[in-house]
Image (cartoon, rainbow, N blue to C red):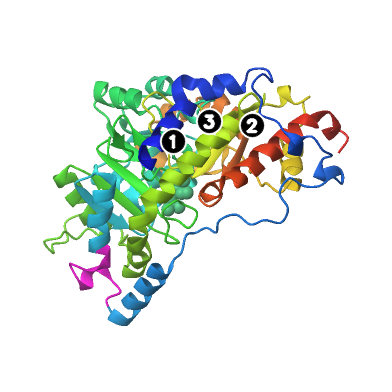
């Protein structure tokens, strides 16, 4: 059996039919503890599970990338418009091929990619785009940059993804598009969101910033909606410091994306529309291009390790890995996301849990502190003259009244995740360290309130 097949099968076995969530929330039955999980907590002076061992380094770098940057430096071709067959143009072709899209336009960041799509779809002042409050600010800012109104729908608290029902509830006569995020690099409930888009004639822009190479219902994320956007910011699973890409099959729309991102100037050389200057430069592409050949191998390894980690955490109550939707074949595993449910841990607060796991040598993070519905941009927008001119006072009032996203608040309180781009490239023993650190803290939970 090929390694690829094995990985897919293992992944599906772990992910099937919500079994991850169901098993993990069951009693301790099936819990895979061991001798390393039984001792005194490192926080209380015991020996840590993982002793001063580093994770596989991230961002990924190899000699081919170094050579490529040197070559670009020496070539004097530093900007994409200096050569139609330069590194950016080549990267666009190769990335489109890798992802399974007809076209790609590379940009300077994921935020720039998203904003370019919003503009290219003709969305602007007076329009509304529905998205999630549980995301990087770049998602929401890409809508605001077009002076359109980001409408935030609540989450499915088990998957950390947009709840399609709440999306549909928030559609108004001004809604033009839905921008779902594939949180942590796992597919959101895209089939239902696409159906809502079709029913209400709304464009769907996939924010696949975290979701490189992930597959859902036979296609790679980013290629299912009209356009999909990626980020190559330093922490991502394909990275160059800052960078982004738009992919899509609609030639006319992708041509408009090129024009918008190229300060409104088309491939034919005419300045045709309003557009920022968002071009990827040759150095960014020089870092990215040589990575692509081995990116799939790293993606498979992350999936394999994630499936193993999930199997190790089975039956540990109150640490529930992200729910995956039917149709999920693989994830990018940019994050390995779990929810920490303190009611199963003698009500030990999440911060104390994180501190204890950290002392065992494994760093988990609470990730997003509060949803974007709770950030000050909301007041800024509601008070701004542009928005007051473009939206009725009643609409802005309703907007404020409907801001609550209780499931997002809960996710922010419960999230415990691993920055996975590097760690999930580790050995099986590294995965055992992660699982054992969590399980050891669980076994000692009654001592944590006094720690
Ligand atoms: C879900 C999501 N959307 C958008 C962005 C913005 O991408 P960038 O940081 O490349 O602008 C990010 C980056 O972290 C992201 O995670």
Q: Tell me if 444 is positioned left or right of 301 in this view.
A: right
Q: Please give the residue where the numbered disc 1 appears in the rendered image.
A: 186
Quadrant where the N terminus is found in the figure: top left
Please tell me the numbered disc located at residue 322. 3
Q: Earlier in the sequence, mark 3 or mark 1?
A: 1
Q: Report the side of 365 relative to 398 (left or right).
A: right
CB atoms at circles 3 and 1 under 8 Å apart? yes
Query: Mark 3 vs ligand 1: CB under 8 Å?
Result: no
The response on whether ligand 1 sits within 8 Å of label 2 is: no
Q: Could you tell me if residue 326 is visible in this image? A: yes
Q: Are marks 3 and 2 in contact (CB under 8 Å)?
A: no
- For the residue pair 370 and 17, the one nearer the viewer reads as 17
Q: Is residue 145 left or right of residue 195?
A: right
Q: Quadrant of residue 413?
A: top right
Residue that carries the numbered disc 2 in the rendered image: 414
State the CA–CA distance, disc 3 to disc 2. Answer: 11 Å
Q: Earlier in the sequence, mark 1 or mark 2?
A: 1
Q: Is residue 207 magenta?
A: no
Magenta stretch: includes residue 80: yes
Q: Position of residue 412 (x, y in %)?
A: 60, 34
- Alpha-carbon distance for marks 3 and 1? 9 Å
Q: Residues within 10 Å of mark 2 (few under 14, many from 20)?
A: many
- Relative to 306, say whether 255 is above or below: below
Residue 444 place in picture, x, y as percent = 81, 32
Q: Residue at x 28, y 26 (%)?
A: 197
Q: Please name whichever residue, 382 or 203, is drawn nearer the observer in this view of the structure.
A: 203
Counting other residues with Cα less than 10 Å from the Cα at mark 3, is it few (<14), some (14-19), or many (20 or more)? Answer: many
The segment highlighted magenta reads 77-88
Q: Secondary structure at mark 3?
A: loop
Point out residue 387 in the picture as x, y percentages from the top left corner. Answer: 40, 40
| Residue 344 location (% of width, % of height) | 72, 22
């Amino acid at each position: 059996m090929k390694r690829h097949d094995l990985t897919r099968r293992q992944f599906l076995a772990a992910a099937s039919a919500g079994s991850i969530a169901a098993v993990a929330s069951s009693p301790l039955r099936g819990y895979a503890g061991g001798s390393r999980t039984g001792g005194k907590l490192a926080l209380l002076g015991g020996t840590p599970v993982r002793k001063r061992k580093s994770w596989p380094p991230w961002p990924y770098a190899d000699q081919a990338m170094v050579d490529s940057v040197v070559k670009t430096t020496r070539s004097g071709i530093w900007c994409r418009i200096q050569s139609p067959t330069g590194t950016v143009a080549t990267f666009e072709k190769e990335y489109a091929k890798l992802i399974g899209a007809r076209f790609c336009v590379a940009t300077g960041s994921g935020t720039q990619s998203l904003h370019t799509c919003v503009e290219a779809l003709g969305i602007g002042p007076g329009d509304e785009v529905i998205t999630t409050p549980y995301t990087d600010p770049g998602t929401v800012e890409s809508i605001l940059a077009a002076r359109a109104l980001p409408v935030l729908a609540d989450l499915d608290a088990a998957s950390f993804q947009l709840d399609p029902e709440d999306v549909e509830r928030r559609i108004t006569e001004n809604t033009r598009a839905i921008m779902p995020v594939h949180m942590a690099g796992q597919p959101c409930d895209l089939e239902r969101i696409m159906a809502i888009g079709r029913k209400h004639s709304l464009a769907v822009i996939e924010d696949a910033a975290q979701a490189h190479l992930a597959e859902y219902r036979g296609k790679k994320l980013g290629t299912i909606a009209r356009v999909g956007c990626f980020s190559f910011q330093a922490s991502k699973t394909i990275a160059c410091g800052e960078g982004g890409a738009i992919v899509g099959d609609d030639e006319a729309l992708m041509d408009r994306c090129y024009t918008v991102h190229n300060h409104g100037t088309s491939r034919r050389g005419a300045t045709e529309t309003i557009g920022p200057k968002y071009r990827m430069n040759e150095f960014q592409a020089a870092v990215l291009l040589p990575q692509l050949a081995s990116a799939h191998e790293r993606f498979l390894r992350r999936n394999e390790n994630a499936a193993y980690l999930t199997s190790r955490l089975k039956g540990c109550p109150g640490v529930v890995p992200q729910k995956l939707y039917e149709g999920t074949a693989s994830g990018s595993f940019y994050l390995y996301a779990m929810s920490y449910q303190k009611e199963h841990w003698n009500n030990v607060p999440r911060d104390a849990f994180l501190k204890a796991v950290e002392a065992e040598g494994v760093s988990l993070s609470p990730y997003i502190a509060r949803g974007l519905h709770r950030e000050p941009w909301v007041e800024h927008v509601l008070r701004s003259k542009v928005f007051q001119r473009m939206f009725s006072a009643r609409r802005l009032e309703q907007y404020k009244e409907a801001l609550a996203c209780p499931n997002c608040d809960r996710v922010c309180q419960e999230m415990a995740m691993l920055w996975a781009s590097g760690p999930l490239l580790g050995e099986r023993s590294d995965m055992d360290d992660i699982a054992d650190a969590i399980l050891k803290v669980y076994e000692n939970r009654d001592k944590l309130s006094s720690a």
